[in-house]
Image: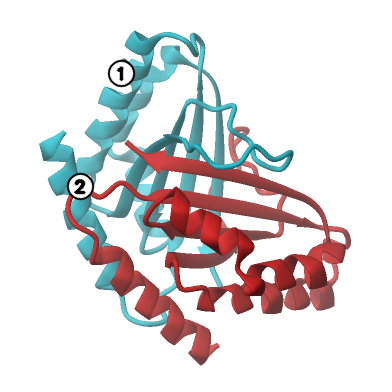
Chain colours: A cyan, B red
Amino acid sequence: MLTTGAAASALLANASSNTENARQLVHHVFFWLKNPDSKEDLNKLLEGINSLRKINTLRLCKVGMPAGTEQRDVVDGSYQVSLLTIFDDVKGHDAYQVDPVHTAFVKNYAHLWSKVVVYDSMDI
Amino acid sequence: MLTTGAAASALLANASSNTENARQLVHHVFFWLKNPDSKEDLNKLLEGINSLRKINTLRLCKVGMPAGTEQRDVVDGSYQVSLLTIFDDVKGHDAYQVDPVHTAFVKNYAHLWSKVVVYDSMDI
């Protein structure tokens, strides 16, 4: 995924350009697939998620899957895909939510997931 | 919190120094306080969490609280504190877990929380 790698690199550079005490918004989304064992559905969802990287209020965008860390009671590794995004502020997040790229993503890929959990945190 | 601000800035710089396609580990922890309305307990927990910033395998460390984004069914805003950390790899995460600063944090502050949920994601 060279193109998404390049995009991710650019986003990391943007994330670091914030001033020292800038408070950012962390928007972390976890997806549970309807068919958790379907490699095809997983790849389809990743295709959709990767389309979001072009939204220009993003300062960081990381797509991941459960890591091979120690199994502990407190660790929830039951999801299939993690989408971690960072914005400069609530306004940047709100613009992302209504961006046509994002609304098209929800419209075209929501049939793939059974559950989504979102955590929105503002830096303190 | 000027000192933690400076530390955060240094960590952001480290995060951006990764090579283009480096796969990192995102370790995101959510804390629910036993006394969610206690400002004193919140500040105590934040004091403990901020002590973790000095652990040297951290590449990003962001401490937050539920943001003022739109209330939606999929958004879980019931926790009190979010601790988002990023490491270069599982090894960096594992070193953090056993770092004396981290074990002291768990020992000295665990009485404050009723629940912790952790999501560990490896970049894909």
* Disc 2 residue type (three-letter): Asn
- Residue beneath label 1, please? A43
Mark 2 against mark 1, which lies toward the viewer? 2
The image shows residue A25, relative to residue B119, as above or below, that is below
> In the picture, residue B72 is in which quadrant?
top right
Element type at marker 2? loop
Residue that appears at 64% across and 42% down = B76
User: Residue at coordinates 45% horizontally, 58% vertically from top-left?
Assistant: B92
The quarter of the image holding the N terminus of chain B is bottom right
What crowding class fits label 1: few (fewer than 14 Cα within 10 Å), some (14-19), or many (20 or more)? few
Q: Are marks 2 and 1 in contact (CB under 8 Å)?
A: no
User: Could you tell me residue A108's position as x and y percent?
Assistant: 32, 17
Q: Nearer the viewer, residue A96 or B100?
A: B100
Quarter of the image holding residue B51?
bottom right
Left or right: residue B110 versus residue A10 is: right
Where's residue A27, x and y in %?
Answer: 46, 49
The image position of residue B123, as x and y in percent, is: 35, 41
Decide: is A30 above or below B82.
above
